[in-house]
Image (spheres, rainbow, N blue to C red):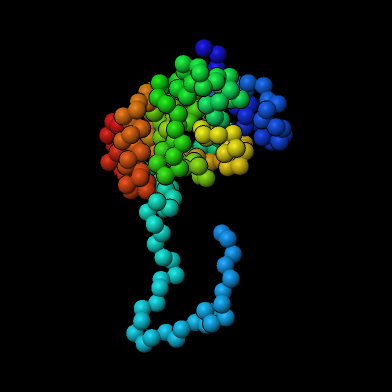
Amino acid sequence: MEDTAGQLGSSIQKQSPVGSQQAGSASRLGGSSRVVRPDAAVKAPKQEGQAAKPKNAVKAPGSIPVAAPAPEQIITSLKVTATGYTAGYESTGKTAKHPEYGITYSGVKVRRDKNAVSTIAADPKVLPLGSILYIPGYGYGIVADTGSAIKGRKIDLYFSTTKQVYKEWGKKSVVVQLIKRGDGKCTESMLKSLGHAIQTYKAVPQYLLEEAI
């Protein structure tokens, strides 16, 4: 099957309408204001002994972003060119009716979860399938896909929609951290285990990196 890659990310720099793009060559995937009454604006006197609220209040668990890996977890750091792609026709040349729509080279389904793990594409000669990376501004990604235009130090980050690609990423040079080098495979069970761990600990626990997930 013909690979498609990188065109969506590259086209963002030109700000051309998505509809005018040709099928790219990306992955093989192929607050409202509130009126305050004058009397409500007056602060009540602090009662003696009343505990002050901490300045850095803990956020609700669902809103806490994932943490970057600990220094000792980083195998190496790589400066890469990162683009964004979707499962749609504009990136892969496939429509929702295609039998392989949304399926990566490794066989797993694409996913984007900034609070857990997302699927990304890379050159397997540089980053084998199953490699786990931390991408600043994107989160944790696992290499599950490849692309004809994704060669050398280039990666393609999956997003659910083209709007997200334009708004959240585009095309960037970024230093990523490799915390586990893959062995050439990526499975749904690996994604499930890794995603659950990151949601629980807000990072990748060391024990998970030391075992074959």
Give the x, y percent position of residue 159.
52, 35
Query: Which quarter of the rendered picture does the C terminus lie within?
Result: top left
Instruction: Name the residue rendered at 39%, 57% in the picture.
Output: 60
Give the x, y percent position of residue 160.
51, 34
Q: Is residue 14 left or right of residue 54?
A: right
Give the x, y percent position of residue 120.
48, 31
Determine the image quadrant of residue 107.
top left
Q: Is residue 8 left or right of residue 103?
A: right
Instruction: Name the residue rendered at 40%, 24% in the picture.
Output: 108
Give the x, y percent position of residue 35.
58, 71
Asked whether 36 or 102 is in front, the reply is 36
Asked whether 208 or 153 is in front, the reply is 208
Determine the image quadrant of residue 75.
top left
Compared with 110, 197 (above or below) is below
Q: Is residue 120 visible?
A: yes
Compared with 56, 123 (above or below) is above
Asked whether 97 or 133 is in front, the reply is 97
Q: Is residue 209 visible?
A: no
